[in-house]
Image: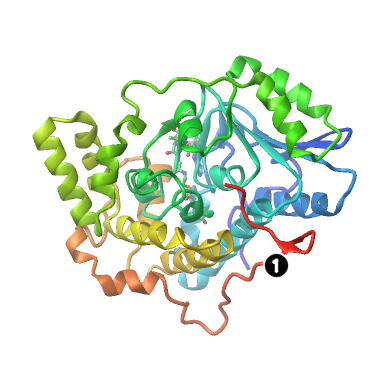
């Protein structure tokens, strides 16, 4: 099978530092904002699997090199090569490995502390938010921007976004809203907030840890943590409006409710939110809303299993090729002007949406099979 990203090597895109019984994993593709290549995903999978069995490893620290923690899966030029005939299966392999990694992280018995400095988007959220400790800073910019890319929030986002207060998850997913570190902490996506000028000190303290005790690790992070105030214009100060609008049954009804708020209150936030929704792929908006709604009552394993079916349909492009158009417009040609097909919400019918949630009709295709994970004789689930 062809390589999705030729030239990438396993060795240096994820660096590992060993200090006693801690391991620091450093995402190391700073020029690409640490976007996850297939080689990085494979290496992380190998490392997490090995550490899970190694009693000598007690704590994992994850961080990114440069100005980003991680800007997502690598949706650059390589991703467009999968448009040919059977090429979608190459893309499917990438997502299968990525979702397996998300699951291994979510069900790991070793505490993971992710230092979320800079950009945390898409796949970057997938390798961090399922872990036990998520440290946001004054430099964190979080988003799940996939609806603007013709995709949907994946990597288990239908699990972690659906568990946010009220209908905030629907807002974050559909509008691709950007959150700062204080907002991540307030809504529960982050467990701690540490000022960026104290992050190195925190890291040094964590490197001396010789236990997997959550109590001990939390105690160390607590020593550096602050409780920042939300900015006055934070979306979290608008929960009443968000709940009222984003609890509606359909995307069309959500937009109508926002339009009412915008006209009655001359609300700039509502106007900007409508603008984001109007720019996003109509197909993406509809499948994302259903994904978050289904995710609320599902386990992390069930969410990833369903998201894998959805992403395979998106890669096959039978109903819509918005995914490739989005990657082209945002990441490759950078004209920021994707041409969605179908272009309007009313042209995306329920049966098309239904189709994204069905099995793939291909005898050689397999559902995502996740390993059974046991801890002290019990199946374990994500800690979020
Ligand atoms: C707002 C960002 C994060 C920063 O903007 P910026 O500060 O103006 O910086 P640049 O946009 O110039 O980014 C610096 C470099 O990093 C690259 N980059 C920045 N994110 C990325 C990135 N996810 N990928 C691949 N290069 C990137 C970007 O293309 C550019 O490369 P180059 O032109 O060579 O300097 C911007 O880069 C951005 O919107 N990135 C996309 C974020 C995003 O939507 N992430 C989540 C979704 S990604 C996804 O779903 C994966 C899809 C995928 C599809 C098919 C596949 O086979 C595999 C994966």
Furthest residue to the left? 264
Comparing 90 with 204, the one in front is 204
Q: How is this picture coloured?
A: rainbow
Mark 1 falls on what kind of element? loop
- The residue at the point 77 percent across, 22 percent down is 204
Q: Nearer the viewer, residue 190 or 78?
A: 190
Farthest-out residue, top: 197
Q: Which residue is mark 1?
A: 371
Q: Residue at x 40, y 55 (%)?
A: 151
Mark 1 burial class by Cα count in 10 Å: few <14, some 14-19, many 20+: few
Q: Quadrant of residue 345?
A: bottom left
Task: Identify the image quadrant of residue 100.
Answer: bottom right
Residue 12 horizontal/vertical position (percent): 74, 40
Front-most of residues 297 and 66: 297
Would residue 188 appear left or right of 240 to someone viewing this image? Answer: right
- Give the total number of marks visible in the rendering: 1
For residue 127, above or below residue 85: above
Residue displayed at 46% across by 82% down: 361
Residue at the spot x=54%, y=85% of the render?
363
Horizontal and vertical percent position of residue 318: 36, 72
Q: Quadrant of the N terminus?
A: bottom right
Q: Is residue 378 left or right of residue 234?
A: right
Q: Does 269 sit left or right of 192 as displayed?
A: left
Using the image, determine if residue 87 lies above or below residue 333: below
Whether residue 274 is visible: yes
Q: Is mark 1 within 8 Å of ligand 1?
A: no
Image position of 100 with respect to 242: above or below: below
Q: Residue 22: percent from the left, percent from the top?
A: 82, 36
For residue 329, say whether it is visible.
no
């Amino acid at each position: 099978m062809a390589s999705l990203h030729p030239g990438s090597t396993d060795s240096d895109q994820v660096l590992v530092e060993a200090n006693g019984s801690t391991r620091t994993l450093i995402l190391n593709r700073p020029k690409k904002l640490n976007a996850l290549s297939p080689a990085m995903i494979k290496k992380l999978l190998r490392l997490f699997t090995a550490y899970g069995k190694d009693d000598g490893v007690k704590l994992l620290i994850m961080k990114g090199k440069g100005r980003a923690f991680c800007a997502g899966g690598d949706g650059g030029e390589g991703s467009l090569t999968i448009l040919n005939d059977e090429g979608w299966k190459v893309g499917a392999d990438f997502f299968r490995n990525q979702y397996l990694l998300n699951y291994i992280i979510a069900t790991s018995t070793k505490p993971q502390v992710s230092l979320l400095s800079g950009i945390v988007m898409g796949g970057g959220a997938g390798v961090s938010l399922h872990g036990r400790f998520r440290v946001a800073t004054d430099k964190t910019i979080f988003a799940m921007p996939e609806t603007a890319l013709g995709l949907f929030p994946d990597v288990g986002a239908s699990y972690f976004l659906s568990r946010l207060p009220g209908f905030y998850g629907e807002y974050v997913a559909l509008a691709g809203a950007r959150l700062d570190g204080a907002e991540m902490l307030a809504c529960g996506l982050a467990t701690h907030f540490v000022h960026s000028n104290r992050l190195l000190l925190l890291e040094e303290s964590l490197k001396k840890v010789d236990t997997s005790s959550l109590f001990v690790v939390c105690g160390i992070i607590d020593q550096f943590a602050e409780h920042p105030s939300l900015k006055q214009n934070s979306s979290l100060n608008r929960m009443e409006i968000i709940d009222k609008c984003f609890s509606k049954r359909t995307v069309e009804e959500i937009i109508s409710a926002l339009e009412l708020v915008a006209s009655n209150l001359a609300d700039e936030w509502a106007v900007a939110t409508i603008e984001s929704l109007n720019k996003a792929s109509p197909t993406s908006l509809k499948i994302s809303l259903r994904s978050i709604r289904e995710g609320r009552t599902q386990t992390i394993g069930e969410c990833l299993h369903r998201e894998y079916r959805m992403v395979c349909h998106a890669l096959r492009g039978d109903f819509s090729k918005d995914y490739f158009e989005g990657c082209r417009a945002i990441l490759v040609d950078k004209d920021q002007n994707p041409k969605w097909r179908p272009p309007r919400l009313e042209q995306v019918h329920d049966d098309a949406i239904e189709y994204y949630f069905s099995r793939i009709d291909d005898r050689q295709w397999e559902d995502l099979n996740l390993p059974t994970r046991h801890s002290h004789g019990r199946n374990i689930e994500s800690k979020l």
